[in-house]
Image (spheres, rainbow, N blue to C red):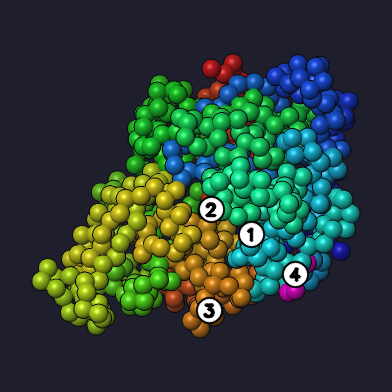
Amino acid sequence: MGFQHKLPGLVMSTGLLGAALLGALTSAKAADYKQAPMLDDKVKSGKLPAVADRLPEHPYVETMVDGVGKYGGTLRTTILANGDQYNLTRTIANELLVRWDPQWKKVMPSLAEEFSASEDATTYTFKLRKGLKWSDGQPFTADDIMFWYEDVFMNSALSPAKNPTFTVAGKPVKVRKIDDQTVEFKFESPYGLFLQQLAYGQGHLPVIYPKHYLSQFHEKYNKEGIPALLKANPAAGDWVALFNSKISLTFQPPFWQNLELPTLNPWVLTVPYADSERVVATRNPYYWKVDTAGNQLPYIDGITWAKLDDPQLMALKMTSGEFDFAFRHINNSTFKSVLFDGQKTGNYHFVDVKDLPANDAVILLNLNSTDPVKRKIFQNKDFRIALSHAINRQEIIDLVYVGQGAPAQVAVQPEHELFNEREAKQYTEFDPKRSAEILDKIMPKKDAEGFRLDETGKRFTINFMVADVFGLSYPDVMQMVQQYAKDVGIDIQLRTTDRARLNTMWSANEQDAYIWNCVGGLSEVYTDPRCYMPFQKADIFFAMKWSEWYSNHATGEEPPEKIKALMAAYDKVNAAVTDDDRREKMKEFLNLSADNFLNIGISRPMPKYMMTSNSLKNVVNGIPITGNLWHPAPTLTQWYFDKPAK
């Protein structure tokens, strides 16, 4: 029997409703299917099958914003030269078994044309669209999902830490193939949030592993051939490194550097995210969506990303008309006035974006530091409180963010029903005297320059990694924080880096501290609490070992009892079957998170925006783009140019 959960701003549709949606999405007839003109010659020459043979039996029919579009053109956008791989994810990836609708109100069928859930929220069944194909034309079936489950997810060498999307209370999911089009996901205990989790970015894992391609790099399937492959790939020391060089669990650079990797995405890379000055993608001829008139999507032929090192240059090129679309790194108060004034010369306009994270600038101390002295101090809640009181948030907001923002900790936004005022406002008062009093109890001794000494008698120094990302002026923010900390005797040394280097340090647990933004400002807090507790390894690494333990108790490091209680509280959120129960459990969890005060927030964000060419149509206004909700990718396939593209 199907059921339906409703959350504030979220609706999960399953069972009979999922089947009803299927009927609404299969109105086009095979004889009516059409393709992009750029593919005509390949079909005529026999290099490609006819469009009806490339599409699944029941293609996904996209609902148009403005109406049926036109084929053609190249979308010009931009990307940071290094460490900006999620820019690609948000543009051309994020194809999932189920997806959010553009209004972020309900979970809908996607690669799965039907889905259902058991009454106790432990068992979920997905029926794939028959005839789905990878970008190389090979079938996508339940065998590909089972390859991910049996040979990647359950393989301790490839997945030493289990992604929490597919675990409950430290126990991994069990996946079973029912037939070529049907799979079952079964959990040992109730998991009422599974479909919502699956509709977010981490839900991509079961559908990005083409067995026919990746099995050649897996010891189980090609043990005798691995030595020759390793010889041809000398950078890989063993089969695990070889396999991981061909794909990435979390859309890290290897995913965007392997042009041979088949995908289910609307565009496929022809120039990788590597050393060249740009990244290029062209349409996937086997893409599985159509418009309401039976035209195979996407409309736009290709996408180019200009690789730039400086967000300021991104903004200038947008105002000079060199891009058709941009949002990452420049959609904030720092560049808003320049971009607003440049709309006419750049031939673009602003589009509202529902991108309200929990905080725009968060100090993340490494509570699992490998340095025992720093670990002890970072884990001391009073130290975090002292550092928080030392920061003049309003001055940072006024000088760096031109008054756009509000002093706040990591917290759900005030307009949301889960808003916790205590969590948002605690310890935000600029009170260096109070800060010094607390620090005097933790590290009372100072050196000749006034910096505090740790228990070994050495100056206590925090090496702070700072990457200039998101256009949020983190280097400027941290220079001010460095001075505030100095005023109370804390030595902060700033180390400028880029996202790629920071990714390497995170993975190795080498960082003392860094600054980042935090997701969880709106309803995604239900499914993505990584800034409120040690949860998963994706950009937020303040307690990596504890998050590993949470996903799999046999790995990582067992956390203190207070952290375990926080994790147990979130398990209750996951297990809740009714909406009212889940909401109350979430409030309890957020209260516990406030008690632990794990991270130090600086500024509550203001509404964001993106820029799109005046010639682009079918652009969803007010689309949510936050955390692992990797939009606008799912709806970008319907974008089109109403005038000939440049």
Q: Which residues are magenta?
A: 185-189
The amino acid pointed to by label 2 is: Gly
**Image quadrant in which you'd find residue 256:** top right
Q: Amino acid at mark 1?
A: Leu
User: From mark 1 to mark 3, how far is it between C-alphas?
Assistant: 22 Å
Question: Is 188 colored magenta in this rendering?
Answer: yes
In the shown orientation, is residue 291 left or right of residue 559? Answer: right
Q: Amino acid at mark 3?
A: Glu
Residue behind mark 3 = 558
Is the residue under label 1 in contact with that under label 2 (CB below 8 Å)? no
| Residue bearing the label numbered 4 | 187
Closer to the camera: disc 1 or disc 3?
1
Q: Earlier in the sequence, mark 2 or mark 1?
A: 1
Which residue has dot 2 on it?
627
Residue 615 at x, y percent in the picture: 55, 22
Query: Which residue is tagged 1?
Result: 158
Report the residue at 46% width, 54% height from top. 503
In depth, the one of 540 and 504 nearer the eye is: 504
Q: Amino acid at mark 4?
A: Phe
Left or right for 88, reference 64? left
Which of the two residues, 115 or 182, is positioned nearer the viewer here? Answer: 182
